């Protein structure tokens, strides 16, 4: 039965009319409309200087890919297989839990080859991504001191291990808004939730207004609760929303300035536009068979992440500012060989397809692609496992991530870890430096993107990070 506003009090009507839109109202409030002025914030909606990046796709590999098994080859591990860590190296490893210093060294079960004009070495696990190595800026010297998944994931995606701060996507949409009219400016897709558990702060708004948190997207069903209710037509919904807007505007006149109410009014409109347009945007059947094959959607192992990567490209085309693709299951404490084979089968071809597709559509030059996890893995065997049952522990003290697109100078390696892969010995960098670099590409000065919280001017990088200037082509 179609609900009519006649014969209902306002509270009852708003409660019923909100069905199908309620979750959107708080998850994605007007990321493309005025951020400035919210509770003392200074999100400019304009870059501070000319940007090289318009959109960001963060390929987050949750659980910790082994850097010496993917992008940081360590031939000395093979030469010292089964030996204990020498004191000359172990003495330089930070005294943090699970460092692996007292365990036996474990050679990578995978080979490495040089690729591209740059000759950067990449693991045999990643033959498809390796073809794009000349577009990659591989950073081999990231490090922090948090050896536990949840806090480390929060640190990587928010700048704080506590989970109380806004996510990167939240800061970006706060600072720049979004060009997407019919979709939220920050969207999240998650695959392989076998572990570790997703950390909600990674797409949360923290102390920023709720409009800046990420909206979770399902590649099959789309945005949760965005379908029109049964028996409702577009005309019915439009009539209801017009009535809601009228009542809210009358209430707003009595409130004078009320940013939350203003945001609520507009959130209903965003939800309505999503109901009309999101199904078409998310319909991958509109893509050619060749395109779907390029992303690995035709293969069982890579179908899910392939759909996510293809959706990321389509979302970029719609102007969505920040897209986070989370792929879990990299936590290889045992059976690292099988674990990483399976994870790379799921992600390698889709990521290569994404880079190729963005490039051929002239979108890579405006889109910054980031790959990596919350930490790497130790060069040693965990416990007393044997053969292919061996795994590695967590290694925040030294690990690898890479950047591509968005003005990044590809075909280069920044930083280095020691000969076994424990700690950086050249150009040590932190997640805060990576965050500052991402913001710089977007034309945002980390020190000028400010939000007043508890009488303190907060910035995205907490206490500041160093922009990795050599990562950019100019």
Image (cartoon, helix red, strand yellow):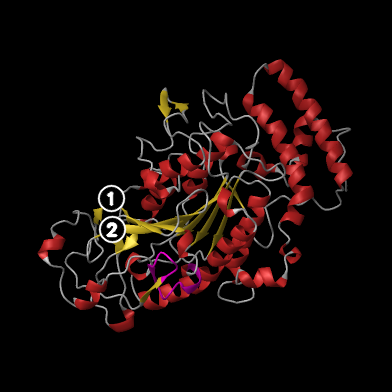
Q: Which residue is mark 1?
A: 427
Q: Is residue 87 magenta?
A: no
Element marked by disc 2? strand
Q: Is residue 129 above or below residue 312?
A: below
Q: Quadrant of residue 120?
A: bottom left
* Residue in the image at 45% along x and 33% along y: 445
Between discs 2 and 1, the one toward the N terminus: 2
- Residue 419 shown left or right of residue 278 in the figure: left
- Residue 455 shown left or right of residue 289 in the figure: left
- Residue 432 shown left or right of residue 304 in the figure: left
Element marked by disc 1? loop
Toward the left, the furthest residue is 87
Q: Is residue 445 above or below residue 377?
A: above
Instruction: Tell me if residue 161 can be seen.
Output: no
The C terminus appears in which quarter of the rendering?
A: top left
Q: Which residue is mark 2?
A: 416
* Residue in the image at 69% along x and 60% along y: 221
Q: Which residues are magenta?
A: 115-129
Query: Few, some or many C-alpha atoms within 10 Å of disc 1 (few <14, some 14-19, many ≥20)?
Result: some
Dot 2 and dot 1 residues touching (CB under 8 Å) = yes
Toward the front, the furthest residue is 117
Percent x, y of residue 80: 18, 76
Foreground of the two, 54 or 29: 54
* Residue in the image at 67% along x and 27% along y: 261
Percent x, y of residue 291: 67, 68
Instruction: Give the Cα distance between marks 2 and 1.
Output: 7 Å
């Amino acid at each position: 039965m179609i609900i009519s506003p006649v014969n209902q009090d306002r509270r009852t009507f708003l409660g019923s009319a909100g069905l199908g839109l309620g979750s959107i109202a708080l998850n994605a409030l007007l990321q493309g409309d005025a951020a400035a002025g919210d509770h003392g914030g200074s999100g400019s909606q304009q870059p501070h200087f000319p940007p090289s990046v318009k959109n960001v796709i963060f390929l987050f590999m949750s659980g910790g890919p082994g850097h010496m098994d993917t992008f940081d080859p360590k031939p000395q591990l093979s030469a010292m297989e089964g030996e204990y860590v020498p004191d000359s190296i172990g003495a330089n490893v930070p005294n943090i839990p699970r460092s692996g210093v007292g365990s036996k060294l474990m050679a990578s079960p995978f080979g490495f080859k040089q690729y591209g004009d740059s000759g950067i070495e990449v693991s045999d696990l990643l033959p498809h991504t390796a073809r794009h190595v000349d577009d990659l800026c591989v950073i081999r010297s990231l490090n922090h001191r948090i050896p536990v998944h949840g806090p480390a994931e929060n640190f990587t995606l928010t700048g704080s291990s506590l989970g109380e701060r806004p996510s990167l996507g939240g800061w970006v949409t706060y600072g720049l808004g979004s060009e997407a009219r019919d979709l939220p400016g920050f969207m999240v897709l998650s695959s392989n939730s076998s572990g570790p558990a997703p950390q909600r702060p990674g797409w949360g708004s923290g102390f920023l207004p709720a409009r800046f948190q990420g909206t979770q997207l399902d590649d099959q069903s789309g945005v949760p609760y965005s379908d029109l209710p049964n028996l409702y037509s577009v005309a019915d919904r439009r009539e209801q929303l017009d009535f809601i807007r009228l009542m809210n505007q009358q209430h707003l006149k009595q409130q004078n300035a009320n940013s939350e109410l203003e945001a609520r009014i507009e959130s209903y409109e965003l939800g309505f536009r999503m109901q009309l347009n999101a199904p078409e945007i998310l319909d991958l059947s509109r893509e050619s068979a060749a395109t779907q094959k390029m992303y690995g959607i035709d293969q069982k192992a890579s179908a899910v992440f392939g759909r996510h990567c293809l959706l990321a490209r389509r979302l970029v085309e719609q102007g969505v500012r920040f897209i986070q693709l989370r792929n879990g299951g990299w936590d290889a404490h045992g059976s690292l060989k099988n674990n990483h084979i399976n994870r790379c089968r799921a992600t390698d071809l889709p990521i290569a397809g994404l880079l190729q597709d963005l490039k051929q559509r002239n979108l890579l030059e405006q889109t910054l692609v980031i790959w990596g996890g919350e930490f790497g893995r130790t060069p040693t065997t965990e416990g007393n496992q044997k053969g292919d049952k061996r795994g590695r522990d967590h290694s925040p003290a030294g690990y690898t991530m890479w950047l591509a697109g968005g003005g990044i100078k590809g075909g280069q390696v920044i930083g280095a870890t020691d000969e076994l892969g424990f700690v950086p010995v050249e150009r040590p960098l932190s997640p805060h430096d990576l965050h500052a670099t991402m913001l710089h590409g977007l034309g945002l000065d980390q020190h000028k993107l400010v939000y007043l919280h508890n009488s303190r001017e907060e910035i995205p990088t907490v206490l500041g990070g160093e922009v990795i200037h050599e990562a950019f082509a100019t």
